[in-house]
Every structure is written in C-alpha cells, then in structure tokens.
C-alpha cells in the first residue's frame, strides 16, 4: 500500500507542476464536493480515507479531488470515465444504452466508473486478494472525483455536442463554450459576487444550506436502493433532466449569457454541489462501514 501511495504522490506532484490549475468544477467545484463529504464521514470511513490519502494531501481529501483530471494526460484510458453521452433531445438516461465509450465498449462512462471504484474500495481491510491487486488510493481519488463529475449536469449531456463542449457562447463579455460555463464560469462569478473569491466561503454557505434549507431532503439524497453502496444511475438521471431544464434551455450557438442566466442557474449549481458532497460521504460511509 505504501508503494502505491508513493506512486500516487509522485503523479499528483508531477501533474500539478506541469499543468496549470483550472477553476470551477475543475478545481473549486471538486474541492467543494470533497470538503462537504469529508465533514460528513463516519469515524470508520474517516480513518480509512486518512490511511488511503497520499502524504501530499495532509489528510485533506479536497486537496487532491482534482487529481483524476490531471492524470488524464497519463492515464488516457480514463478520459471516457468522466462523462456520459445521451441521445440528443430525449432528455433521458439508460445505463445499458448510454454507458459506453466512443468505441462502444460498455461500462466505460462516469456511472460505470463509480460502480467500478466503489467495488474496488470494498476490498479495503478484507481478506480479498484483490485488495493487493487494486491501488486503493487511486480508487478513492477516482471515486471522489467522479462523484463530482456526475453531478455536473453537462457531464450527462447530448452526444452530438459532446456535453455542450461544441456550443460557443459568451459569458457576459468572455467567449467560451456552454460546458465551460457550467464547469467554471457560474461558480467563478458567484465567488466574485458573494464570497470574496474564496472557495471556503462557498463551502460554508452550502454546509449551512444542507443543515437548514435542504435538511428535509438530505436523507433522500443519501439513500441507495437495495444493498447498493452507490447509485450513479439516479445521479445521472437527475443530471440529464437538469441539463435539459436549465443548462441547454434558452441557449443557442452564439448566445450571450448574462445575469438572467446566472441568477436562475446558480441555485441549480449549488444544489448539485451539495448533493455530490452528501452522496460521496454516504457512499464512503457505506463502503467502509
């Protein structure tokens, strides 16, 4: 295990140095999901996470929650695991139909990845010989990141526009693509307006909402049917519905998105970040308990 953790540490250090950090659901969004999650862990899960984290994290899951994005340059096979492409304009998701990569290989999507890394982590502290085979530190980092990705609505977007990556828009005066608006721009704008550009203030605001305004919904967010440890199909179904109702709605090629879009979409971003954090914690609690 120490050998694996050293390798992960070296990979994190190398990629943080070589590639600039991006903001939004690239950094601040994933940081937020993991920060919320770690605060909600049971003692058993907190102990397991502490043991699995690379030394560079200093016990802070949020500090390495972006790792899976950086490592795509090295683990090219992992790129398809960050999203799901669904049929254009159907606004529905079906695992058997949609969870595949561009070569039609099944299970290679973010929902399949969540299932896979959840199963790997179940071998922690067991007599299962796979516990030696798996790099459980990487499993933890992948699972934590992908739980964030699946809660970004356009990571469950349409096939033809690659989750809105080919839809050019203006965010106020800045040229970008619609996917990036949801990955980054909405969160950045909110931080500038409300949080003094401080991600920890965003986290604190969401934590307060979880314990107050959303308190009656938290149990339903955490729940998972049957004996499943994670329920990514639920999260993906919510994602494509939110993409249709909020992300794509009213947007066309060349649209200029300003206050009307920001003020109505930011609450959706807030809720999806909160759900991602609550569900990551619930999943880790089920795995390690």
Image (spheres, rainbow, N blue to C red):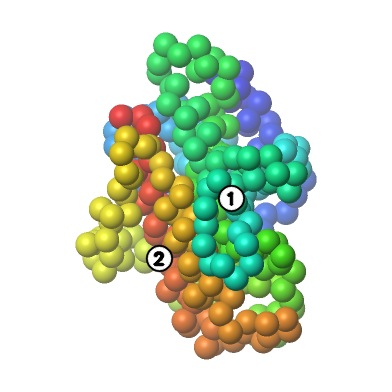
Figure check: 252 above or below 43: below
Residue 107 spot, x, y in % from top left: 59, 40
Q: Give whichever of discs 2 and 1 has the lower sequence position.
A: 1
- Residue 200, by quadrant, is bottom left
Asked if residue 264 is positioned above or below residue 179 in the image, the reply reads: below
Per the image, the residue denoted by label 2 is: 271
Q: Quadrant of the C terminus?
A: top left
C-beta proximity under 8 Å, tags 2 and 1: no
Q: Is residue 45 left or right of residue 11?
A: left
Write the residue at 62% across / 62% down: 87
Is residue 79 visible from the viewing direction of this image? Answer: no
Residue at the image point whose x is 57% and y is 59% from the top = 156
Instruction: Describe the element under mark 2 as helix, strand or loop.
Output: helix
Q: Is residue 198 above or below residue 218?
A: below
* Residue 78, percent from left and from top: 68, 40
Question: Label 1: few (<14), some or many (≥20) within 10 Å?
Answer: few
In the image, 231 versus 264, the foreground residue is: 231
Work out how far the residue at label 2 is from the one at label 1, CA to CA, in angstroms: 27 Å
Q: Residue at (42%, 74%) from the top-left corner?
A: 267
Q: Quadrant of residue 161?
A: bottom right
Label 1 residue SS = helix
- Image disc number at residue 173: none
Callout count: 2
Question: Where is residue 231 shown, x and y percent of the image?
Answer: 41, 45
What residue is shown at x 63% (from left), y 40% (from top)? 106
Check disc 1 and report the residue beneath it: 97
Is residue 288 in view?
yes
User: Label 2 neighbourhood size at 10 Å, few (<14), some (14-19), many (20+)?
Assistant: some
Quarter occupied by the N terminus: top right
Label 2 or label 1, whichever lies nearer to me, is 1
Image x and y of residue 93, in percent: 52, 57
């Amino acid at each position: 295990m120490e050998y694996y953790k050293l390798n992960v540490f070296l990979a994190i250090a190398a990629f943080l140095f070589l590639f600039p950090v991006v903001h939004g659901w690239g950094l601040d969004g994933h940081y937020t999901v993991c920060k919320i999650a770690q605060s909600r862990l049971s003692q058993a899960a907190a102990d397991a996470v502490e043991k699995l984290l690379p030394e560079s994290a200093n016990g802070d899951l949020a500090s390495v929650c972006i790792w899976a994005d950086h490592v795509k340059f090295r683990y090219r096979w992992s790129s398809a695991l960050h999203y799901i492409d669904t049929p254009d304009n159907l606004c529905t998701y079906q695992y058997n139909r949609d969870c595949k990569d561009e070569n039609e290989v099944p299970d290679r999507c973010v929902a399949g990845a969540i299932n896979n890394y959840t199963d790997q982590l179940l071998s922690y502290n067991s007599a299962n010989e796979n516990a030696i085979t798996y790099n459980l530190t990487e499993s933890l980092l992948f699972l934590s990141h992908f739980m964030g990705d699946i809660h970004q609505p356009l990571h469950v977007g349409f096939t033809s526009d690659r989750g809105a990556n080919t839809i050019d828009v203006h965010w106020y005066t800045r040229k970008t693509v619609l996917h990036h608006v949801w990955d980054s721009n909405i969160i950045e704008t909110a931080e500038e307006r409300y949080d003094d550009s401080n991600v920890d203030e965003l986290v604190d605001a969401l934590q307060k909402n979880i314990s107050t305004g959303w308190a009656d919904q938290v149990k339903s967010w955490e729940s998972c049917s049957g004996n499943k440890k994670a329920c990514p199909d639920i999260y993906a179904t919510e994602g494509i519905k939110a993409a249709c109702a909020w992300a794509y709605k009213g947007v066309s090629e060349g649209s200029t998105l300003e206050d009307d879009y920001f003020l109505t979409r930011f609450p959706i971003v807030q809720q999806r970040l909160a759900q991602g954090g609550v569900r990551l914690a619930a999943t880790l609690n089920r795995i390690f308990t």
